[in-house]
Structure formats: structure tokens, C-alpha cells
Amino acid sequence: MYGLLRNLLFRLPPERAHNVALGSLDVAQKLGILNTFTRQPEPCPVNVMGLEFPNPVGLAAGLDKNADHIDALGALGFGFIEVGTVTPLAQPGNPKPRMFRLPEHQAIINRMGFNNEGLEHLITNVRHRRYRGVLGINVGKNKDTPNEQSEQDYRKGIAAVYPYADYITVNVSSPNTPGLRDLQFGDSLKQLLHAIKEEQAACEQKHGRYVPVAVKIAPDMDEQGIRFVAAALLEAGLDGVIATNTTISREAVKGHAHEQEAGGLSGAPVREASVKVIQGLYAELGDRLPIIGVGGITDGDSAADKIRAGAKLVQIYTGFIYRGPSLINEAVEAIRKEIS
Ligand SMILES: Cc1cc2nc3c(=O)[nH]c(=O)nc-3n(C[C@H](O)[C@H](O)[C@H](O)COP(=O)(O)O)c2cc1C
């Protein structure tokens, strides 16, 4: 069924297809016919970051940047949904076209550049949602905010979404906001983590509830970089790490017509690099700090691979575009076998 729909959608330019697909999903959900097309996964509960997840397969950030479609996406059987990246102020992102399909590789290149409607819009949506499952909110910084002041944007984001999120993700790994990924290294990272923990403590005090915060990192990191991040996260007392975002490497898609497009590459070509980062993190962290594995999950085996590498939860984006909702079930079943 999804195969047919996908053939139609793939005739449209990628961003248009994205909007049409999400709009149709909303309609199907409102008409109450969504469950005709999807099969809910059997429960596979896991407890991570102090939260109870009905199953370990979540939707990765970036598909529903403004939380406009939570209810429809939440009805598909995901164990959790992550919305955003949201920046304090609305911003248009990069000029179009900025999303490219590489079907031969089950991949996407995107340079969206955090196009989003800002915190206020997202929070209004989140407040009015019907979805009662686990909700992560992913926060970033505005393009015009200089890196030295990025801390303020992250603080604003955390403070604003804190009352509504089950967990918060701090995104320092998008390749499409100039300089953002520098925040993953050295003193910049340590300072940022310190600020995050300070803001989280202030919010906990204010709202009387502890909301875990995870940091999302890039796959383009060497062993030393991974060890540094792991140590810094532990030292600062973060609650989780999401590995990984898209890659700037084009090694796996050499010779493709879109190879030279700037942006982050996702889907099957990022799978191996993501697993390596997860393995490296797990070697340092063990079970002291949970890893959420994301990057190139396109079937059950690649989902189970993330768990074997040390992840406690997984997320999908590009695989979901290529395979549709049946991938959720397939991933849940493969992980169930792996952990039982
Ligand atoms: C079009 C597109 C937009 C994305 N936007 C975001 C974003 O706003 N924030 C974020 O943290 N990750 C974003 N991502 C990265 C995904 O959440 C995920 O980490 C990455 O694509 C690897 O997973 P995948 O291979 O399953 O797609 C985006 C990915 C794609 C393809």
C-alpha cells in the first residue's frame, strides 16, 4: 500500500511530497481511517532516562519541525516522537531546492537550515496535542545568533519547552547552520553543557519536575572526539546522547548526480558511521548514560544493529520515507528478538 503511495509522492519534488504526505496523514487521522493502513506494533516496553516507552522505535527530529502533525504521526505506532529542531525565533531556512532524494542509496541529502516557525508556534501546537505518548522536543539556535551567544538560544529553548516535553534534545550537530557543529568540541562543549545543566536545574525548581536532556551529535567524529564527548557528557551529568545526525561525507554515494549537493546525507549511507559512533560511545559510557541510535535504519536488522552496538532506543527518518509505517513494526520486532 505504501509502495503505491510512495510512487506517486516520489513524482513530486521532495519538499512538496513531504508536505503533501503529512497533510494527507492529518486528514486520514482526522477521518479516523489511519489504522486501516497501519498495524500497531505489539507492546515492547523499555525504561530509558527514567521514562516509560511503549516500544523503543521513535521518530527522529526534523520531519515535524513545528509539531504541526504530532497527532497523526503519534497514531502510527512509534514508541516516541521527537519534534523540532525549533529555534527561538522563526526563520526561513536555506533557499529551495534544499532536499534531494538518492533512491539508489535509500538516502536523502538535505540543507534545510532549521526552517521553522519558532518556539511560540511549536509550543501552541504541543499544548493542543491529543497525542499522549512520549514527546521529545529538539532545540537549536537561530542562524543569526553568533556561536558565542548560542548558549542563550539553547537556554531560551529549554526554558520554553520544559513544561511540555518528556525529554529535551540539544542539537549541536546539524551541518546546515554554519559553525553549529563546533559546539561539539573542547571548551565550547563543556561551557554549553554547563549552561544546559544550569537551565535544567532552574526549570526543575520552577516546575517541580525533572525533564531529562540529551545531546545530539554528528557521525563525522574521530575516536578521540567521541571519547571527549562521552567524558564531557558524563562529567556534566547529561541524561542521554543521540547518535547520530546526518553526515557531511559523500564517500558512500560517490558518482551520484546529487553527490555535490551541500548538506547532510542520511539513510543507508550513514548507517555504518552511526554504528561506529554508538560503539565508541558505549565503550566509554557503558550503561551509565543511555544512547539513542539513529542513522540509516531501513529494516529490522539495521535497527537491531543499533541495539547490539549499545543503543537503548532508536529513531528513524529517511528509512520511514522510503519504507513507510511498516518499518516501525519491523524494527520493533527485530529489537524485541535482540533484547529478549
Ligand atoms: C530532511 C531532513 C531534515 C532533518 N532535520 C533535522 C532537524 O531539524 N534536527 C535534527 O536534530 N535532525 C534533523 N535531521 C536528522 C535526522 O533526525 C536523523 O538524525 C538523520 O537523518 C539520520 O537518520 P536517518 O538515516 O534515519 O534519516 C533531518 C534529516 C532529514 C533527512
Image: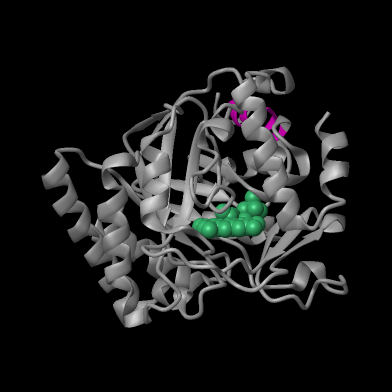
Which range is magenta? 327-336
Question: How many labels were placed on the picture?
Answer: 0
Q: How is the image coloured?
A: one colour
Q: Residue at x 53, y 54 (%)?
A: 278
Q: Is residue 280 left or right of residue 97?
A: left
Residue 189 vertical position relative to residue 329 in the rendered view, above or below:
below
Residue 313 percent across, percent down from the top left: 50, 39
Residue 231 percent across, percent down from the top left: 34, 64
Residue 270 vertical position relative to residue 18 in the rendered view, above or below:
below
Instruction: Write down the quadrant of residue 249 in the picture.
Output: bottom right
Residue 164 percent across, percent down from the top left: 32, 40
Q: Is residue 123 left or right of residue 306?
A: left
Q: Quadrant of ligand 1?
A: bottom right
Residues 327 and 85: in front is: 85
Q: Is residue 18 left or right of residue 91?
A: right
Residue 36 vertical position relative to residue 294 in the rendered view, above or below:
above
Residue 333 shows in the view: no
**Quarter of the figure that contains the C terminus:** top right
Question: Which secondary structure dominates the residues rendered in magenta?
Answer: helix
Residue 163 percent across, percent down from the top left: 26, 42
Q: Residue at x 67, y 27 (%)?
A: 28
Instruction: Write down the quadrant of residue 145 in the picture.
Output: bottom left
**Quarter of the figure that contains the N terminus:** top right
Residue 77 shows in the view: yes
Q: Is residue 221 left or right of residue 236?
A: right
Q: Residue at x 67, y 23 (%)?
A: 34
